[in-house]
Structure formats: structure tokens, C-alpha cells
Amino acid sequence: MGILNVTPDSFSDGGQFARIDSALRQAEQMIADGATIIDIGGESTRPGAKEVSVNDELARVIPVLKAINSRFNIIVSIDTSKATVMSEGITYGAGIINDVRALQNEGCLPVLAQDQSVGICLMHMQGLPRTMQYDPHYDNLIDDITTFFQQRILACTQAGINTSRLIVDPGFGFGKSLEQNYSLLANMAKFQCLDLPILAGLSRKSMIGNLLDREINERLAGSLATAIIAAQQGARIIRVHDVKETVDALKVLQATKINR
């Protein structure tokens, strides 16, 4: 899954792809590099990020979604927590809704229940982007996140959403300390008990920068290491900025599995 942030303030590439021409060039490059999903985000969810209005998010996301779908044969994901953006995204051909709030916002469950063809990624986040990194606490990290997923899966099924549409994302960096993030990575295979595909998004995150003392543009090696570990832990979708390098790394991992 290649990340395409069409925002002015995303932590890694804010402003680089806010224009539709630059967004299309980046999408084309990621597809050429091996991405099979493009994830468009119109609102930054970095720690401390401000909320974006529905109209502003629609103005950022929908033109890019339409342009990509008119030019490329690829699954497009919309990274949003707003029911209106989800609805418009589905209208214009989004194949996945990727929600950091796991459809907890008003109106999201009914919107996703109306269209049975769209995949849904439920992410775990403790707190909200503005406050999520203020001393996050868990009684038991894996058990607490598993319980959260079970509750959200139940909410989905009660709303009429089939579990075959669901993906889970444990939410690295979203309300987790440095130690908690690496414990989560080491134990991610335990979420296979949910019998759903797992998405892992660790690319360039502060858990890498803080561990290695590396700035954002120096985190490729750490990002590749986390991608490999996530795949070994059972992640089916790896969400990244550096598509070409990650595809290469995963091909090497796959070759070791084939030739055992």
C-alpha cells in the first residue's frame, strides 16, 4: 500500500503532493514501483495534528481519487474518519475505506453498510491525534487492542457489515509509547486470532526515528526492517512511503519462504 498524502501538514511528506499533477506523478511512480493499493489521505493524523473540515478534506481527496481511477487500474483506499468523505469516496470508486477511528464517528457505520463491495480497515488508536501520545497506558497491550477490535467487529456485524470486508491495523504510533510500539511489533502475530487480514503501517514513523536517532529522511533502513518483521508476523498489507525499496525487501523474504 503506497501512501499518498494530499495534505499540507503530514509528518513525512506534507505539501509535496497537494497539487493534483504532483499527486498523479507520485501515484504513477508508486504503481510502477510495485504498489497494488494507493492510500489517499486528506487529513494529517500525526501527533498534535489539527482537524480538517469536511469540505476541505473532500476538496483535497476526491479530485485525486477521480484522476487516479480514470488513469490507472489499481485499488484506491481513502484514509478518512468522516462519513461524508467515505460516502463520496465510495461514489467515485474507492475500493477501501481506511479509518484511524475504526468507524466510531457518527454516521460511518451506516455509510459502510450501504455498499457491500468496499473493504474496511479498522485501526486502533488510544485517544485522538492531538492527545494520543500523552502518556498512553494499557493494562495489557495486546489484550486491550484485541478487545477493542472484537468490539468494533461486533459493531460492524450488528450494522450489517460482513466480516469478510474487514482488515485490522494495530495502529503503530497512535497512542503507544516507544516500548509499546516495539512490543506490538514483536507480538503482532497474536492478532491472527481475529481471522482477519492485518495491515501494518510503520513507515518512517517516530518509533524508528526515536530508536535510531534518525530524522524523517534517514529512516529507510529502519522502515524496511519493520516491514520485514511485520510480514513475518503475518501482516498481509504493508503501508509505506518507499514502495520500490519495500517491494524489493519483501521479495527477498518471499524467496526464503518458497525455497525452504
Image: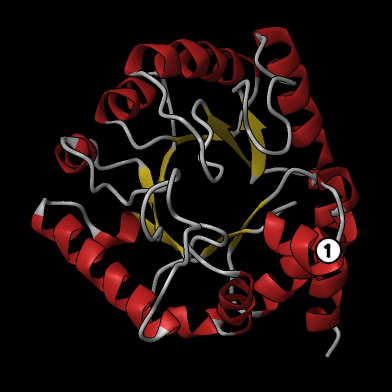
Residue visible at 79% across and 72% down in the picture: 254
Measured along the vertical axis of the image, is residue 184 above or below residue 250? below
Between 88 and 164, which is closer to the camera in this rendering?
88
Amino acid beneath label 1 = Gly
Residue 186 shows in the view: yes
Q: Residue furthest front?
A: 134
Q: Identify the residue position indicated by label 1 in the image.
A: 222
Residue visible at 58% across and 64% down in the picture: 236
Between 13 and 163, which is closer to the camera in this rendering?
13
Circle count:
1
Secondary structure beneath dot 1 equals helix
Residue 166 location, x and y as percent?
35, 57
Between 155 and 181, which is closer to the camera in this rendering?
181
Q: Quadrant of residue 222?
A: bottom right
Neighbour tally class for label 1: few under 14, some 14-19, many 20 plus, Cα within 10 Å: some
Residue visible at 27% across and 23% down in the picture: 84
From the image, which quarter does the C terminus lie in? bottom right
Would residue 45 be found to the left or right of residue 81 on screen? right
Would residue 65 be found to the left or right of residue 223 on screen? left
Q: Residue furthest left?
A: 158
Q: Quadrant of residue 130?
A: top left
Measured along the vertical axis of the image, is residue 103 above or below residue 163? above
Measured along the vertical axis of the image, is residue 10 above or below residue 56? below
Residue 251 shows in the view: no
Would residue 143 be found to the left or right of residue 177 on screen? left
Residue 211 location, x and y as percent?
78, 69
Q: Residue furthest bottom?
A: 260
Q: Quadrant of residue 107?
A: top left
Would residue 173 be found to the left or right of residue 136 on screen? right
Residue visible at 15% across and 59% down in the picture: 155
Measured along the vertical axis of the image, is residue 160 above or below residue 249? above
**How was this image coloured?**
secondary structure
